[in-house]
Image: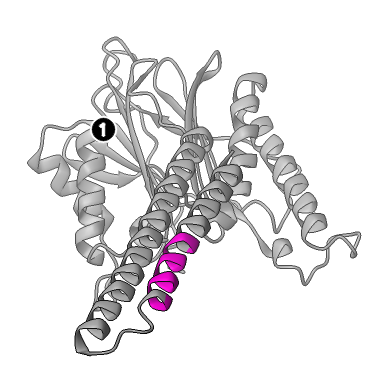
Amino acid sequence: MIRIKARVTTARGAVLATLWGAVAVAYKFGCSQQDGLGARIVTSAVFFAVGTGLIVYVRRALLRELRQARRVAGAAQSVVLRPVPARLDGLNLAAAQLSADRGATIGGDLYEAVATEHGVRVVMGDVRGHGLGALGTVAAVLGSFREAAHDEPELVSVLRRLERTLARHLRERSRAEHPSSGAQDPDNPVAEEFVTLLLLEIDGEGGLRALNCGHPWPYLLRDTRVEPLTRAEPLPPLGPFPLPAELEARPCGRLLPGESLVLFTDGAEDARDARGRFLSLPTVLREAVYDHPLSAQTVLRTVFGAVLHHTGGRPTDDIAVLVLRNDRRNAGIPGARGTARQAPTDPQPTTHR
């Protein structure tokens, strides 16, 4: 339908341009016998009017096509990266994504949260690269997660499903881009693609279990404190290396009522200002905790406002943020607040790419 409409618009433009040109040429020949300054002025005015009309028409046609392309991109994003529900099994959620490509609405970041019989399961990921080139990988990974989150009783099995889906997607994409090569070429840029991925499971009592493949750990907001959910070393990103044969989801304590988790892609912490200084996301979150009544939507607005202010409105990487706040009234075991969470012991590497 889009191609048909574009062809119709182009045909109308060609017909109108031909008519205007014919009018100008006819007037030129009709007045060719006239001499004098007045005739030349009138002729120039006619050609100027025709040229201006053509420019205005072409500009309007291009703007219409641009608006149509943006509507299509927005529709594609709403299907691939659909909005998370405001409430999910007693959790308050808010999420948003910002593309590094100016004017684009689709980036290489992905997130999703679904309520299953195994608990609320959340995925946050970052595809290498950004813009439309990463859209296919985002769609493949999210589609697989939406099925596996309901089908697989164990979080490890969900991750293995995602690994197989990504490998299959990259093979098919390699064949499509290099049909004569047969097998995947190691020099093919597709072979170098990877996805950082965080899988999170929250059970009915707020118990947290996680699997992390090269992704930043979420920040936990507890009262007025901001701390990483854990400092454990993550697994390598999906794509370059296979998952270990022995794999187990990591227990991460419990998300108690009133506490929040802030999941994000590394574009948030890698955001730089004009002097090249990185954004301090923990500092931004502490300000959100101290200055506002805490809600998922408030934290989300604070983070994106800080990122845009820090980068002067021009981030260089895609950014996605997902905030979960436990609003369950009866969740957890009474008196467990002081003993619910195991202290993290492993150092967390901090790298910026």
Queried whether the magenta region covers residue 101, the answer comes back as no
Image coordinates of residue 350 in percent, x first then y, are 42, 63
Q: Quadrant of the N terminus?
A: top right
Secondary element type, mark 1:
helix
User: Residue at position x 74%, y 52% from top?
Assistant: 170
Image coordinates of residue 278 in percent, x first then y, are 29, 68
Q: Going by the picture, which residue comes out furthest to the front?
A: 33
User: Residue at position x 33%, y 14% from top?
Assistant: 331
Image coordinates of residue 42 in percent, x first then y, are 24, 77
Question: Which segment did they paint magenta?
Answer: 18-29
Image coordinates of residue 22 in percent, x first then y, are 46, 66
Left or right of 123 in this view: 205:
left
Left or right of 17 in this view: 195:
right
**In the depicted structure, whether residue 2 falls above or below residue 239:** above
Numbered-mark total? 1
Residue indicated by mark 1:
296
Q: Going by the picture, which residue comes out furthest to the top?
A: 330
Picture quadrant where residue 330 is located: top left
Q: Which secondary structure dominates the residues rendered in magenta?
A: helix
Picture quadrant where residue 339 is located: top left
- Please state which of residues 33 and 158 is positioned toward the viewer in this rendering: 33
Left or right of 301 in this view: 7:
right
Queried whether the magenta region covers residue 23, the answer comes back as yes
Asked if residue 148 shows in the view, the reply is yes
User: Residue at position x 39%, y 22% from top?
Assistant: 206
Asked if residue 319 shows in the view, the reply is no
Badge 1 density bin: few <14, some 14–19, many ≥20, Cα 10 Å? many
- Please state which of residues 242 and 94 is positioned toward the viewer in this rendering: 94
